[in-house]
Image: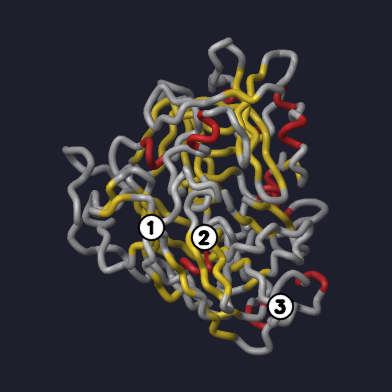
Amino acid sequence: MIRTILALWAICLLAACSGGGGTPTSTPTSTPSSPPSSGGTPVVNSATVTFDAGPAELNVGPGAYTAFNEPYVSIKICAPGSTTNCQTIDHIILDTGSVGLRILQPVINQSLLSALPAQTDPSGNAVGECYMYVNSYVFGSVRQADFSIAGEKVANMPFHAIADAGVFSNVPASCSSGGGTNITTVKAFGANGILGIGTTPTDCGPICAAGNTTGAAYYDCPASGCSAIIARAVSTTAPFQQLPNPVAAFATDNNGTVLVLPSVAPAGAVSMTGTIYFGIGTQANNALGSQTVLPVTTSTNRLGAGLLTAIYNGKSLTQSFLDSGSNDYYFIDTSLPACSDTNLSAFYCPTTSMLLSPTLTATNGTMVNAAFTLYNPMTTTAGSSNVAPGLGVNPTLVQPPLQFANSFDFGVPFFFGRSVYTAIEGRSAGGTQGPYIAF
């Protein structure tokens, strides 16, 4: 994930990862291709996805702004085993480009926070996590809570409490040495937290199981401070060690998701809603129909998980991805004019809307047209719009520049007007083995 702020909009980009509107224009309705993953009455497996101005904290004080193209959901966490010491937290980014639940610690009310146990290592020390983004990072404790969204639940699930207090106030050098900004506030994050529902069962898989670090690392945190990186096992059932993909940890509907969003008019919208369905082929509302299935890289791939190859302007960009947590398209094209407005200097400003035609290639060679219309932010979006289609960002002009020379990031505008399926690695989803993306 990359987090950076341009003058007008907070850009959320998940990479290892910021008048239309209304209800979704389509819903998966064909007959499920596989039965539910457990018997009995199906649970409520859908939740509303909201695009709006974001948490109130964004629009307060110096550097105030409103959210742009951010898909938010509400989640509920409780003290383990409690039905009363609970908190519903809104404005959690729904992200298909990362894995795990992360919440800004100051958002959690004190009575609940004090009842959320810290995960510990074999020595009895608290466990911390550093999660690296391309130009920023977050650090904090790993705590445990009972988690729920819609009718789906996970008991005693570890989550990342960003910017937790005490021993976690001091970021270990091996975390901060990657550079970028240490994100500690809702305003810097653009949300109260993030729900990562990507293609892997846990947030860093074999890498963290071996005690190594690239995009994420777990730390032993005695009272003297966090310094030693420790191994954390891969598991989507208790006892957990790594942060699980919450969907993979569900008792049912646990093989992936379907994100259904409406189309957005060129003029943009103040707000809109869509739907996230949990499970693929497990209930009547999440069947895999005629969508093209695109297998993606696994957690053992040296370049990372969830990747496809995008062919654009004759180049094969082998580290490309679809990512609902990125609020625009991020790609390099020096033939496109940059915006002259200094507040929009990283954006492309075509004189008229343009049809761009990248092609996506899956790991099995399946190819699909991924064409989209690129709009000019100077003429397309109204001043009050918090949602807009098809804006493009040159990652080399973002400050600090993003390392995207071999990537094409299809952000949330690519999801508008589509049903996008994200299948989890190692799970059969609609009769096809994950991991894959389908649309």
Whether residue 275 appears in this view of the structure is no
Relative side of 75 to 394, left or right: left
Which amino acid, by three-letter code, is at mark 1?
Pro
Task: Answer whether labels 2 and 3 touch (C-beta < 8 Å).
Answer: no
Q: Which of the pair 108/298 is nearer the observer?
A: 298
In x, y percent, where is residue 288? 27, 60
Vertical placement of residue 123 versus 387, above or below: above
- Secondary structure found at label 1: strand
What's the distance in space between the residues labelled 2 and 3, CA to CA? 21 Å
- In percent of the image, x 54 and y 47: which residue is there? 302
Q: Which mark is residue 295?
A: 1
In x, y percent, where is residue 6? 75, 62
In x, y percent, where is residue 376? 66, 80
Whether residue 166 appears in this view of the structure is yes
Vertical placement of residue 89 versus 209, above or below: below
Q: Which mark is residue 208?
A: none
Q: Which mark is residue 321?
A: 2
Vertical placement of residue 283 versus 411, above or below: above
- In percent of the image, x 66 and y 47: which residue is there? 133
Q: Which residue is mark 3?
A: 334
- Secondary structure found at label 2: strand
Relative side of 423 to 376, left or right: left
- In percent of the image, x 77 and y 44: which residue is there? 179
In x, y percent, where is residue 265? 52, 78
Q: Which of the pair 296/419 is nearer the observer?
A: 296
Which amino acid, by three-letter code, is at mark 2?
Phe
Quadrant location, the C terminus: bottom left
What's the distance in space between the residues labelled 1 and 2, CA to CA? 12 Å
What's the distance in space between the residues labelled 3 and 1, CA to CA? 30 Å
Decide which of tag 3 and tag 1 comes sooner along the chain: 1
